[in-house]
Image (cartoon, helix red, strand yellow):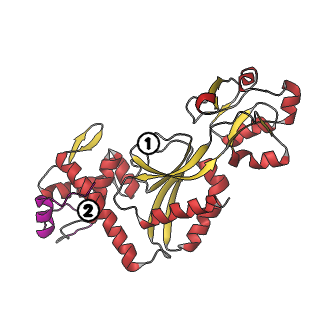
Amino acid sequence: MKPAPLGPVFVAYLATPHHNTANLGSHESNKTPMDLAAIKTYCRAVEAGNLTAAAKALHITKSVASRRIQSLEDDLGVKLLARTTKGVTPTDEGALFYERGVRILDEVEDAAQAVKHTSDNLVGTLRLTAPRSFADLRLGEPFMAFMKMHPALKIEMNLTDERVDIIGGGYDLGLRIAADLVDTSLIARKICQIQQYVVASPAYLEKHGTPKTPQDLKHHNCVFYSNVEAAKQWRFGEGANAQAVRVSGQVTSNSGLMQLAAAAEGVAIATLPDFFVGDALKTGQVVPLLEDYTRPDMHLYALYPERRLLPLKVRLLIDFLADWFGKE
């Protein structure tokens, strides 16, 4: 869709000096007509749905965030946000301002990068979130290689295996491992495929027998990953050959390493992605099961908010990760 032109209110706003502004943390006067810090604060508030989260993402206090947004509303002469006990939502005028405000911020960042630096020397701060387990095992090397290439770039990482609100948290980028994505509000790029295995130790199989079909798992002790919906429903195959088996067991954990330990120590059967079990398979601690009945593959996705311009630092990091894992 072609971006709509700036409306008369914005043209007038840009052209007129503004002095009726709130104190934004320092005693300012004669501020520039378009306060980028205030616009950024407003856009983050809309994305997060509340001022507290927006302020946290920007490393400012809630009172500073409130004053910045009040400054915009005073200067424009319109109410941008509807405030309730549950949070904030944009008014009709606020939604219009948000749409253009995001473009302004992207344009400014892109212009600064183009004028001051090349793609060989990124600057600024990139905020991202990624699964902790995958990051600990697989992201350290590529991220440090990227940082060496761009020593002026700062990266803030929130590593957690819990699902994170990428927009609400003010993140530039989120990495997520999933078989199917449900975040329709985000743009997704597939980085690499991740294979899932069903594994057990030789000792477990010697004592309890080896399952020959997925249905045999009903009679075995299995370990579950608590961060996944329907963790006790293990799917196999695709399309007409798809089947789901409801399994049971002693251990439920939000740690893939704990699940691997349960399998390696002969306690249970586990289903785990390749980055967890690769080394254990090589050493024979665990062996693959049901190889004729494949588990649905998962993928590592790069997710980011929908914008007309993707910041150069985000685009280059995504390209770098896709190239890095594509060579494996």
Residue 166 located within the stretch drawn in magenta? no
Q: Secondary structure at mark 1?
A: loop
Q: Report if residue 308 is visible in the image.
A: yes
- Dot 2 crowding, Cα within 10 Å, few <14, some 14–19, many 20+: some
- At label 2, the amino acid type is Leu
- Dot 1 crowding, Cα within 10 Å, few <14, some 14–19, many 20+: few
- At label 1, the amino acid type is Asp
Residue that label 1 marks: 183
Residue name at image x 47 percent, y 74 percent: 119
The magenta segment is 1-28
Residue 36, how many percent across, how many down?
27, 65
Residue 234, how many percent across, how many down?
64, 29
Residue 24 is labelled as: 2
Residue 104, how many percent across, how many down?
28, 63
Which image quadrant for residue 328? bottom right
Q: Earlier in the sequence, mark 1 or mark 2?
A: 2
Q: Report if residue 17 is visible in the image.
A: no
Residue nearer the viewer, 85 or 2 = 2
The mark lying in front, picked from 1 and 2, is 1
